[in-house]
Amino acid sequence: MPRVLRVDCYNQEYSLENTKTLTPARFGVQEHTAHKTHKYHWLDERGIVTLGVGPLSGTNITQAQDAVFTIKEPSTNKLIATPLPDFSRALRSAHIDYVLFEKKSPRPLVIGACFNGELHLTFKQFSDAWIEHTQKKDVTNARTRVARFFKPFYKGCNTVQGFTSGSGAKTGYGSVASTQHTKRGGVGSVLKHAHNVFGFFSGGDFVDEIFDELTINRVYQATQGFLAHNYPQLTRGLEPAYAFNNAYQKTPHHLEALCSDISSFGAYTGLCTKEAESRVLARINECALDAVTVQHILGGVMHAYAHNMLSREEFVRADVNMNAEEYAKNPYYYANEHARLYVHVINAIEQQTRHGRILSLPYNHVRKEVARAFGIRVQSYFKNLPSTPFYDIMRAEGGLSAGHNMPANTFSELVGMKVFRKIDFVEHAVKTRELFSAYNQKSV
């Protein structure tokens, strides 16, 4: 049966129990409902954060190795599921399926879990000054420095992996990072502000590779049907994913296609070269910021600049060229100029200097404070941030990686083989989506 690790961050205590819940998003929404967290603000220490793995984690099914957080998202105060890519093996090697963080540590806390015949936990507290100094460089540096304290604890473990938050946790949309980042939801901010958790490490010697390549291929050939939003029952009545937007409203349509070839981030912010986009995303990752929310903030700033509603000096002193009409003529040149500007804005957010403090708030507050500081018309350039699209709920339930090509029937068949019972994973995900919707209708 799946194992749950419950962590009391205030008392530095933990307990282990079994559960019948098969999937991480279902576990998360059930625990949030049981704790009645819909009554609380995301900052409230009476809330919880859950982290879990999909039913095929720890096996040699490489497409199903994401861990999944469920949190109350700062921007909306609604419950969402958001993935931490490639972290499931770290939990499974410690013989853990789900982790629940509750209460708030008096000092910044890092937790280590190690399975070596049995599960052991260690808790290490750090000073605020040490955390502040460590986060100044980047989140990778922070994780490396923290890991040194746990080296003796993990002696003999064949798998160890951890995540830490970066300076973005000071904002309302900080992520956490392991080998990759959580890209959505402000997990780092919730862990830091509501529970004072700076990081979590997990490792051990538990192995659960139950499928060989022949078994996987045979199941693939025997099943049909594709996962996620091809199933209308998962998308009915839901908000769409993030709408495409140009950096400038005047931009010709051919640039829309040009930017969208890069990624949704480049498309939204008008970065039409991979070099320019990579430069901005690298800085976002160094700070451990939520890339999706940041793209909306940068897009809002650029819209307001383009319509003469903000001056460059409001946020940065860098000499950056910005001209909507010229951008349409030479987008490659202006992509680099915009990248320079965006890095300066990100620095202002990270350092919370000048008006960067406004942009570091949860996004719904950003819009209000921008209107208060610069006028109601400026607010209109900061688009409403859509809720997390729940057509991705099957991906969250399965711990499936982005870009997977796992057919739904294949996934159901493999899960059934592992848990020794038949399961319809589409039906399971639809029920989970309904639980999320019911929770969020009650949420304050």
Image (spheres, rainbow, N blue to C red):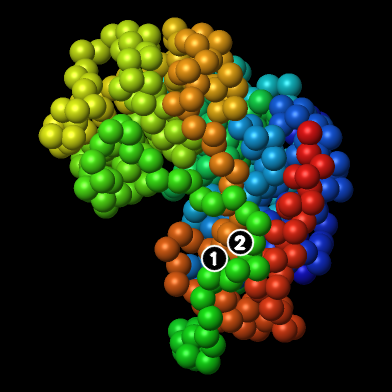
Q: Nearer the viewer, residue 117 or 129?
A: 129
Q: CA distance from mark 2 to mark 1?
A: 6 Å
Determine crowd level at label 2: few under 14, some 14-19, many 20+ residues with C-alpha closer than 10 A. some
Q: Give the residue type at disc 2.
A: Thr
Q: Which residue is mark 2?
A: 235
Side (left or right) of 92 relative to 308:
right
Q: Which residue is mark 1?
A: 229
Q: Give the residue type at disc 1.
A: His
- Whether residue 155 can be seen here: no
Label 1 residue SS: helix
What residue is shown at x 13% (from left), y 34% (from top)? 329
Query: Residue 46: x and y, percent?
Result: 81, 32
What residue is shown at x 19% (from left), y 28% (from top)? 325
What residue is shown at x 63% (from left), y 54% (from top)? 238
Determine crowd level at label 1: few under 14, some 14-19, many 20+ residues with C-alpha closer than 10 A. some
Dot 2 and dot 1 residues touching (CB under 8 Å): yes
Which numbered marker is on residue 15?
none
Q: Nearer the viewer, residue 439 or 162?
A: 439
Please identify the quadrant where the C terminus is shown. Answer: top right
Q: Considering only vertical position in the picture, is 309 above or below 20?
A: above
Q: Considering only vertical position in the picture, is 160 above or below 379?
A: below
